Amino acid sequence: MNMETYRREGEWLELCIGSVAAAAGAEPLAPGTHPHAVRLWLLQHTDLPPKWLGRLFSVGGIRWHGEALRLLAFPAVDPGRDSLYRTAAAGGAPRAEALYEDDFCVVLYKPAGMPVHESYPGQTGTLDIAAAGHALDAGDPLPLRHIHRLDDDTSGPVLYAKCELAQLRLDEAMREKRIDRRYLAVVNGKPLPPSGTVDEPIGKDRHHSSRRIVTPRGDKAVTHYELAERWGTASLLRLRLETGRTHQIRVHMAYKGNPLLGDSLYGGDMRYIKHQALHGESLVFPHPWTSEQVKVAAPAPAWLEPLKQKLKGAK
């Protein structure tokens, strides 16, 4: 479906049944058709998730408004009862730049040093709280949920669903590897060959709870890399993930003998930067309503140019 098939009216998605029917080659629904029959029609003629339509039907979320069909797609969160919104409302919300936003999703820029979500109760300064603050500033407190994560010290774009429909669709896209994530990394040395694929399983290190290792007992992990530039004794790489294992790029590059600069956990050189030199460069995902590809580029991180100059001047 395209953007012209709906319009948002507060919590409701008002569906243009004529456009949907024409696209499906079906007879349009008559206004006032019982919600149960509407649900069956939508199941037959659209790709809206059955689970979502069933839930809408059960809570009275399929209604007619005159001749317009409305679906309860954007129910608001009560900011006073949601912990993220309470923290944001209390003045504890950091700011985050929106790189892309529409009714269904938002992509926020996460700087290095900011965690995506809390790792202990009451933690502030997370991107999740920044997302809640962003929604409060817009007067639109929706149930935001991150679709993927970045390590605390990795900068880059993070995708959030703004409603249940978007979350179902984007979670499915993640499982089916239809969300493309590209990264920049600065590593020790020069990888050989200068471009290639690391296809090695990753699992927990039984001797170090925070570390991951390449192990036959691990989960499948695939990282594609390409040399972009050489800066002194270090290399700037562009990388693409097929899978999303914890610390995947960091583990795979260390396994090749080219750990990320600043990555003390995996043996990286700490002289030039105090956190891993890893940045999410871009994100491509299928839009949860139209299925069209959305491409979002992130700005270069603040640490990249100073690191480049240090490495070029290093003896």
Image (cartoon, rainbow, N blue to C red):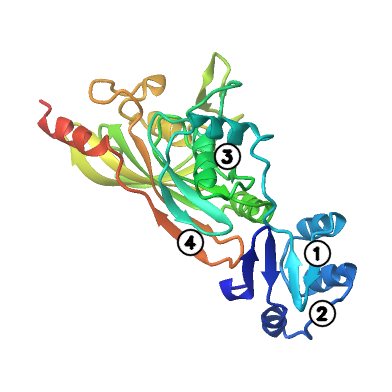
Residue at horizontal 22 percent and vertical 33 percent from the top: 307
Q: CA distance from mark 2 to mark 1?
A: 12 Å
- Whether residue 283 is visible, yes or no, is no
- Can residue 136 be spotted in the picture? yes
Circle 2 packing at 10 Å, graded few (<14), some (14-19), many (20+), is some
Q: Is residue 70 above or below residue 211?
A: below
Give whichever of 60, 23 is nearer the camera. 60
Location of mark 1 (residue): 62
Judged by depth in the image, the label closer to the viewer, 3 or 1, is 1
Q: Position of residue 61 (x, y in %)?
A: 79, 59
Q: At label 2, which amino acid type do we have?
A: Pro
Q: Which mark is residue 220?
A: 3
Q: Which label sits in the foreground, 2 or 3?
A: 2
Q: Earlier in the sequence, mark 1 or mark 4?
A: 1
C-alpha span from label 4 to label 3? 27 Å
Quarter holding the C terminus is top left
